[in-house]
Amino acid sequence: APTLVWFRRDLRLSDHAALDAAVKRGGPVIPVFIRDRAVDALGTAPQWRLGLGVGHHAEALKDKGSRLILRSGAALPELRRLIEETGARAVYWMRAYDPLSIERDSEIKSALKDDGIKVESFPGHVLFEPWTVETKTGGYYKVYTPFWRAVKDREVPEPLSAPSRIPTPESWPDSETLDDWKLGQGMDRGADIVRPFVRLGESAAQSRLGAFTGSKLEDYPDLRDLPARDGTSNLSENLSLGEISPAQCWHAARRAEQPGSWAASKFQQEVVWRDFAYHLMWHTPQLLEQNWRSEWDAFPWNEDERRKEVIAWKQGRTGIPFVDAGMREMYVTGRMHNRARMVVASYLTKHLMCHWRIGQKWFEDCLIDWDPANNAMGWQWSAGSGPDATPYFRVFNPVTQLDRFDGNRAYTDRWIAEGKSNPSDDALAYFKAIPRSWTIAPDDTYPDPVVDAAEGRKRALDAYENRDF
Ligand code: FAD
């Protein structure tokens, strides 16, 4: 009898334990993707990117002689309908670790088991499942370095190859069409601008990884912090939708390791930051929504998104070049360099004293590499409210950060048009991507700072020191 493989944020064929097990079980395999509430709840850019990913994955399955059946609605009734239509006796999927998926998946697992269906979920979205990493006293890790030490010498299973053949059913159940779903419709604000920056699908992700380990890995420790240099793997976009697995990244780095060099290990450490974010989200799901350190609830955060400085921050018009360059890079490419993410997040939460949730939500609307755990951890880290966070009094100075990490201004020149006689194509593309209601133009005067770097720092530190929280 057929096995349903329910794809979610794991749009790949290789190193896919659920697909592999379904093929090995024997009998036809029916791949399915369900547009449920979790999909509808995604921010604009992540939903649009997911739509592209699902379309690409459907093509990849087609190349293997298989198909991707698309359904919309609540997942349990849709799976039950498919079971009835196809006679499937088993449903397999890859595990997710965010609270809403866990709730949904456990409910589905027990309901289908009650129906007499074999249900199995498989690991692979992270290297080390959150409950498998424990402190000596049996708790979870709240600080990264000991987490890294606990996992760095563990055996990571070799990634599975893609099945050479995916057995097909005699007849296929009906499928909806992706075009009708209109995923990420809100991207009419600039999809054409962002699209060329997208590296879509499993084979693009594998080429990216190959190019990175082949020629960029050795310089990674030196270049990864420089936003004007293409010194990182750029794989976050693909990891976010499971177009590549973290185990594939881990093993590729290990294979490329040079004697005496720590570059591969540095890259593995970054990939493990992602695992750490999942570890924290699984053990303390409030990471996604509330101050992880509840004493921060009493901090006088500004939560009003209509304030002019919040609007200026979103529009990349704060008058602080490093911040504005980062915000524009995100709007045009759907991604932002990690150094810039730290600078824009520090500026919003400290200089502008805005709640980190405002930034978290805006990133969730704009990033094509949006990841629930990484985004929440990054914001709480920057704001000082998270575990292993930068202390609040460590206010990144966006001016000295720029001198240090973009000394020749290649990054700000790439993204800021105002005041330049010959602005770059990317700086101009920003004005094509933004909504018309943002009445700003490349020949405007570059704004004065909404909050001056030194003044904002003092204000934030005063609020912090006078705290009675
Ligand atoms: P590389 O340097 O090549 O690293 C390889 C992989 O390791 C990355 O793809 C990523 O999966 C993981 N990684 C690297 N750095 C981090 C980190 N600091 N935290 C967690 N994982 C990391 N990353 C996202 O994937 N999605 C997000 O929504 C996201 N939001 C962020 C928000 C803020 C405020 C901050 C400060 C960071 C955020 N990050 C997020 C983490 C980081 O900025 C990106 O993962 C990184 O810039 C991706 O580029 P890369 O793939 O070239 O990374």
Image: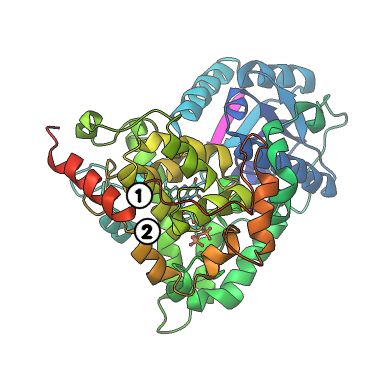
For label 2, the crowd category at 10 Å Cα-Cα, with few meaning under 14, some 14 to 19 and many 20 or more, is many
Residue displayed at 64% across by 66% down: 421
Q: Which residues are magenta?
A: 117-121
Instruction: Give the labeled residue for mark 1.
Output: 346
Q: Position of residue 366 (x, y in %)?
A: 57, 42
Give the number of marks: 2
Q: Which mark is residue 398?
A: 2
Farthest front residue? Answer: 445
Left or right? Give the position of 228 relative to 464: right
Q: Quadrant of residue 87?
A: top right
Residue closest to the eye, 103 or 326: 326
Q: Position of residue 284 (x, y in %)?
A: 32, 34
The amino acid type found where label 2 is placed reads Pro
Residue closest to the eye, 215 or 397: 397
Residue closest to the eye, 457 or 443: 443
Farthest right residue? Answer: 171
Residue displayed at 49% across by 24% down: 106
The amino acid type found where label 1 is placed reads Ser
Q: Position of residue 15 (x, y in %)?
A: 61, 52
Instruction: Give the spatial CA distance, label 2 vs label 1.
Output: 9 Å
Question: Which tag, 2 or 1, sits closer to the chain's start?
Answer: 1
